[in-house]
């Protein structure tokens, strides 16, 4: 079972948060560092918040920072509609509404201790996975080998450049990157993210594997992991793309008897055998 990440906060009323700083990461992603105006946000890797703009609505956004970080929390917002377009226009000092954190299916921080960890990220899938990756780096002695596979469509869609460079320089994390489309400025691997799996030095059959990315990526990554004899019980998938209200009321994320926002957004793959349409 996952660790409980339940919250006693009012599930309907947002609290005010102040934007401390923003940074355009590429043509569609905006980085935000925020602080709650009342009590600090307490969360676990894998949880998300509902970000609201008065008069427009709200959107579920994954928390990208580690709970070990002090002084606030971090979000990365993709420009996809009216709410997120407005968020992209906000600046340091502006106020915004925050509900949450939500999600009872978090990354298994306790269960993973002592094990080798492999994160497979497709594009913006790095954003929620980054929370657990940095949590592991801040508690490095509690975990085994740490490997991150990151695939993006093209090099200009990459983000967190300085952080990725810092990971490459460390000797306690292995980062492998690839792009789908070859470019003159790119000197790394070219191909989909599954082409990086053979580069993993850890024993895949005994590792915990975490997957987050676009829907089309999941099927091929899971097929590759099955070929590598990785148990479904040690594979965790993030389905946060399906959420809307965040509290299991609207039904938008319902998949048979499961609600992604309440039961997830991180699921053990073996728990989804009865709902194959979830992937």
Image (cartoon, grey):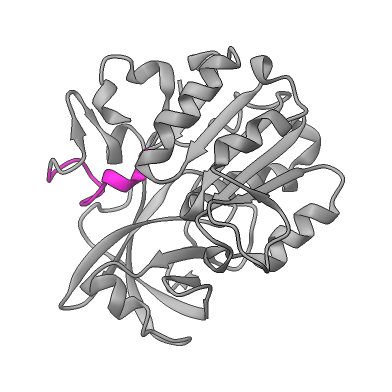
197 in magenta: no
Q: Compare residues 1 and 240 and report the one nearer the observer.
A: 240
Q: Compare residues 99 and 154 and report the one nearer the observer.
A: 154
Residue 268: % across, % down: 44, 23
Residue shown at the point (19%, 40%) measured from the top left: 248
Vertical side of 261 occupied by 208: above or below = above
* Left or right, residue 238 beside residue 112: left
Residue 260 visible in the shown view: yes
In the image, which residues are magenta?
A: 239-250
Residue shown at the point (24%, 26%) measured from the top left: 277
Q: Quadrant of the N terminus?
A: top left
Residue 7 visible in the shown view: no
Residue shown at the point (36%, 85%) measured from the top left: 89
Q: Compare residues 213 and 270 and report the one nearer the observer.
A: 213
Residue 165: % across, % down: 76, 61
Vertical side of 61 occupied by 196: above or below = above
Q: How many marks?
A: 0
Residue shown at the point (41%, 71%) measured from the top left: 28
Q: Quadrant of residue 147?
A: top right
* Left or right, residue 170 beside residue 194: right
Residue 46: % across, % down: 47, 43
Vertical side of 264 occupied by 231: above or below = above
Q: Quadrant of the C terminus?
A: top left
Task: Kindly report the secondary structure that dominates the magenta region of the rendered protein.
Answer: loop
Residue 203: % across, % down: 73, 19
Q: Compare residues 74 and 69 and report the one nearer the observer.
A: 74
242 in magenta: yes
């Amino acid at each position: 079972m996952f660790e409980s990440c339940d919250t006693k906060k009012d599930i309907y009323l947002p609290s005010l948060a102040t934007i401390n700083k923003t940074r355009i990461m590429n043509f569609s992603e905006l980085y935000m560092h925020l602080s709650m105006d009342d009590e600090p946000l307490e969360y676990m890797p894998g949880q998300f918040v509902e970000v609201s703009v008065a008069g427009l609505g709200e959107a579920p956004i994954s928390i990208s920072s580690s709970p070990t970080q002090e002084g606030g929390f971090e979000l990365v917002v993709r420009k996809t509609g009216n709410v997120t377009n407005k968020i992209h226009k906000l600046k340091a000092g502006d106020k915004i509404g925050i509900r949450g954190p939500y999600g009872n299916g978090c990354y298994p921080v306790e269960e993973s201790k002592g094990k080798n960890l492999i994160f497979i990220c497709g594009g913006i899938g790095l954003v929620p996975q980054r929370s657990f990756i940095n949590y592991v780096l801040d508690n490095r002695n509690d975990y085994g080998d740490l490997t991150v596979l990151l695939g993006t469509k093209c090099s200009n869609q990459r983000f967190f450049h300085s952080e990725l460079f810092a990971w490459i320089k460390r000797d306690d994390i292995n980062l492998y990157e690839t792009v789908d489309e070859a470019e003159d400025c790119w000197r790394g691997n070219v191909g989909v993210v599954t082409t990086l799996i053979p580069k993993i030095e850890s024993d895949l059959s005994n590792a915990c594997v975490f997957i987050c990315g676009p829907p089309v990526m999941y099927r091929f990554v899971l097929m590759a992991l099955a070929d590598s004899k990785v148990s479904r019980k040690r594979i965790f998938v993030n389905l946060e793309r399906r959420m809307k209200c965040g509290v299991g009321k609207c039904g938008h994320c319902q998949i048979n008897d499961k609600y992604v926002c309440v039961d997830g957004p991180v699921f053990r793959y073996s728990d989804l055998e009865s709902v194959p349409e979830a992937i």
